[in-house]
Every structure is written in C-alpha cells, then in structure tokens.
Amino acid sequence: MESYKREFIDFLKGAGVLKFGDFTAKSGRKIPYFINAGEIKTGEQIAKLGEFYATAYLDKIGEKKTVLYGPAYKGISIAVSSSIALAKKGLDVPFFFNRKEAKDHGEGGVFVGYVPKEGEEVVIVEDVITAGTAIRESMAILSGLQGIKVAATFVMVDRKEKGQGEKSAMAEVGEEFGFPVYSVVDVYDIIEYLEEDPANEENVTRIKNYLAINGAK
C-alpha cells in the first residue's frame, strides 16, 4: 500500500472519522463501518484533511482553477479547508456551500460564498458516496446555477458498493452526470490496512461479508 494511503487511514482512525460497528447509511443500507467527517473537530484535524484533498485535487486536476462546492453540512468544512490548503500550494480557488433552507432576507438565496458564473467549473467535495444519493441531491441544487459545469467530485473513501444497479455508486454518478469521482482511498485499502493486525479480524470479516452482498461488480 502507498504510504500516503496508510497515513490517511491512520488519520481517519485517529480523528474518529472511521468507525466500525453497526450503522445505517443515508441510502438506508445497514453498514459495518462508517465515515463521518463530522468527527473532525479541531483546527489541526481539519487543516490536515484539507491537505489530503488538495493533494488529490492537484494530482487529478492539476493547476486548473475551479470553484469548490461543499454540500451542507459536512462538505462545508471540507471545501473551506481544501481551498486554504490549495492556496498554500499556490492555487487560490474560491469556494461556496448551500444553506439547507433558502434565506428570504438580507442577501437571500440558497448559496453562501462565491457563486460561480456562467462558464466556470465546479468541483464537489464530499465525505463519502454510498449509493450516490447525496451527489444527486447536490446536482439538483447546483442545477439552479446557469451555465456552470461540474468537473469532478472528490470524496474521502470509495466504498466500492452497488449504486442503483450492479455498478459502483461512483461509476454510476460519473456516467449519469459526465464527470469523474475521485477518492483518496477505497474500502479495499482499508481492508488491507486492517489485515496487518490480527486484532481486526472480526471487522475485516464483517466488511468482506457486506461487500459480498452489496459490493459493485
């Protein structure tokens, strides 16, 4: 496994973002592990997360300037920290996020931050994709912006699960909307990481059994 992947999984575990147990995903599936960006609670942690996203951005997109969009609520801090990290690396990109409810006073509207102009490209930064539900919600929200294009989505972990069909949710989202979905690590990296310690045998077995049913073909 590449060193940066191990470093990232170490970070997720240390911050309490990666948990093992019995959880229910937004898709309604019962899952044996959970990725929760809401557990990142300190300046050092969110700064580190932004660095991982910035590294992934530069690796996949390069120096191309886009606009980062962080879906409320967990995507907000990811968008902010990623834009700061990119600025430190010499690429100053604007960011914005949505309100859960449109504001009908003051400046009004559903978006906060930089609002993309016609012809500009947007990159969505999310915590994880399970069945693609959250991304489809984001695309519905972004459809209110005229003339913008979503260039890519970045997530922490590719769960390698079925979406609405047999393909992975990430693959389905990419095909449906015409943009790539990138992740820092995937569930098989997590399995490989866990298998290095025999104490993790139960969690490894539960994840493998889950993927045997819900894993993408």
Image (cartoon, rainbow, N blue to C red):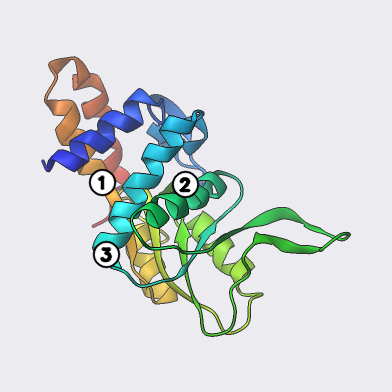
Instruction: Compare marks 2 and 3 and give the one earlier in the sequence.
Output: 3
| Image coordinates for residue 62, horizontal then vertical, percent | 28, 68
Q: Residue at x 39, y 77 (%)?
A: 178
Who is closer to the viewer here, 214 or 54? 54
* Residue 158 visible in the picture: no
Judge depth for marks 2 and 3 and give the one in front: 2
Q: Position of 58 compared to 24: left or right?
A: left
Q: Which residue in the protein does label 3 denote?
A: 60
Classify 102 as above or below 22. Answer: below
Q: Which residue in the protein does label 1 denote?
A: 185
Q: Position of 80 compared to 164: left or right?
A: right
* Residue 93 visible in the picture: yes
| Image coordinates for residue 15, horizontal then vertical, percent | 39, 26
Q: Amino acid at mark 3?
A: Lys
Judge depth for marks 1 and 2 and give the one in front: 2
Q: CA distance from mark 2 to mark 3?
A: 18 Å
The image quadrant where one finds the C terminus is bottom left
The image quadrant where one finds the N terminus is top left
Mark 1 neighbour density, 10 Å: few (under 14) some (14–19) many (20 or more):
some
Who is closer to the viewer here, 62 or 32? 62
SS for callout 1 = strand
Classify 70 as above or below 196. Answer: below
Q: Amino acid at mark 1?
A: Val
Looking at the rendered structure, which numbered label has been put on residue 216?
A: none
Q: Which residue in the protein does label 2 denote?
A: 81
Labels 2 and 3 touching (C-beta < 8 A)? no
Instruction: Compare marks 3 and 1 and give the one earlier in the sequence.
Output: 3
Q: Residue at x 47, y 47 (%)?
A: 81
